[in-house]
Each structure stands twice: as C-alpha cells, then as structure tokens.
Amino acid sequence: MAIDKPNSSDADDRQLFVELLNENHSRLFGFIYTHVLNLADAEDLFQQVAMVLWTKFDQFERGTEFGSWAMRVADFTIKNFMRGRRRSKVYFSDEVVQRIVDHQTVAPEGQVAQRADALRGCLKKLQATDFKLLEKCYGAESRIKDIARAEGRTAGALYTALSRIRRVLLACIERTLKAEASS
C-alpha cells in the first residue's frame, strides 16, 4: 500500500499551526489553569483544546489573532468540562468565566503573563492555612460539603472563606502589578 506524500500546503498548515500554538502556549495554558486550578486537569484540557484547534484549523482565518480564536475554543472546552464536574467542586459562575474570557481575549499576552506571575507570587504569600484550603477546594476531588465537614465548618462558612481568600489574592495581584508599573 503506497503512502501519499503530503502536499506542501498540508505541511505548511502543520508548520503554521505548530508555530501559532507554541507562540500562544503560555497564554492558553494559563487561561485553562485559571479555571480549573488543578495541574493535571489543565494539562488534559490543554491537550483536548490543541486537538480541537488542529481539527478545526481549516476554519481559522489567516491574518486574524490565533490566540483569541484559541481562547474561544478553550472556553467552550472548559465549559463542557465544568458541566461534567460542577456538582463536585467549586467553580466560577458562567458570568465570571465569560468576563475572564472577554478580558483575556483582548489582553496582550504579556499582560496575561504578568498577571499569572503576580498570582504565583501572591499564592506564595498566602497564610499556610489559606493556601491549604485553596488546595483542598480547588485541587482535590472532594466536594465542598465534605471539606466543610472535615474542617468543622458549614459549607456557607467555607464559601465565605474562599471569597475572602480570592479578594486577598486580587488585591495582592493589583498591588504587585501597580508596583511593577511604577518601577
């Protein structure tokens, strides 16, 4: 059985796709990780998104922003993933997710990377108990009510604590970015 040699346009498409995906890897992976806060899930979702992007690459309009297109594809993939797991974990509401998508599809890649770096730094500054709580709620397969019971809290108290931690992280990120901008 003879194997046909790919024509040059197929090879060119593959090369272009690989280049565009590599250029947007950090931005896209950061976007996915922001939603799932679990490295293994983020890696799996990135692979799924990459496959969808490749299968739909013929629909990508050359000359437009590949990163924005990839983020929209990632958004749909993440939403499908979240629907399947919504009952067992805490996730952002669809409205919050959409605001993140809207912001990140128009934000320059450097700005997204700066915010991700700031978030990493701010996570390191969290109190150990707050960081452990984030890991339990966003990084494990446990349900909030089970975590609350193990912590000796109500689910409502746990949601309140998570909201407080997110506000602390947001304030830290904004301070960090403001300090970097003024230096």
Image (cartoon, rainbow, N blue to C red):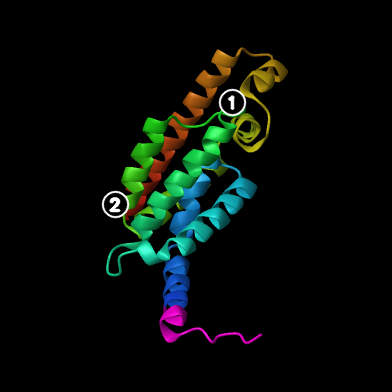
Between 116 and 39, the one nearer to me in the picture: 39
Residue 99 appears in which quarter of the rendering? Answer: top left
Residue depicted at 44% across the width and 71% down the height: 17
- Quadrant containing the N terminus is bottom right
The residue segment tinted magenta is: 1-12
Between 2 and 73, the one nearer to me in the picture: 2
* Residue 76 horizontal/vertical position (percent): 44, 45
Marks 1/2: CA–CA distance: 31 Å
Question: What kind of element bears circle 1?
Answer: loop
- Circle 1 residues within 10 Å: few <14, some 14–19, many ≥20: few
Residue depicted at 46% across the width and 60% down the height: 53
- Quadrant containing the C terminus is bottom left
Would you say residue 175 is visible in this rendering?
yes
From the image, tell me which residue sits under label 2: 106
* Residue 103 horizontal/vertical position (percent): 32, 45
- Circle 2 residues within 10 Å: few <14, some 14–19, many ≥20: few
Residue depicted at 56% across the width and 50% down the height: 45
Give the vertical position of 5 relative to 126 (above or below). Answer: below
Figure disc tally: 2
Q: Is residue 51 left or right of residue 147?
A: left
Residue depicted at 64% across the width and 18% down the height: 145
Three-letter code, disc 2 = Val
From the image, tell me which residue sits under label 1: 87
Between 169 and 183, the one nearer to me in the picture: 169
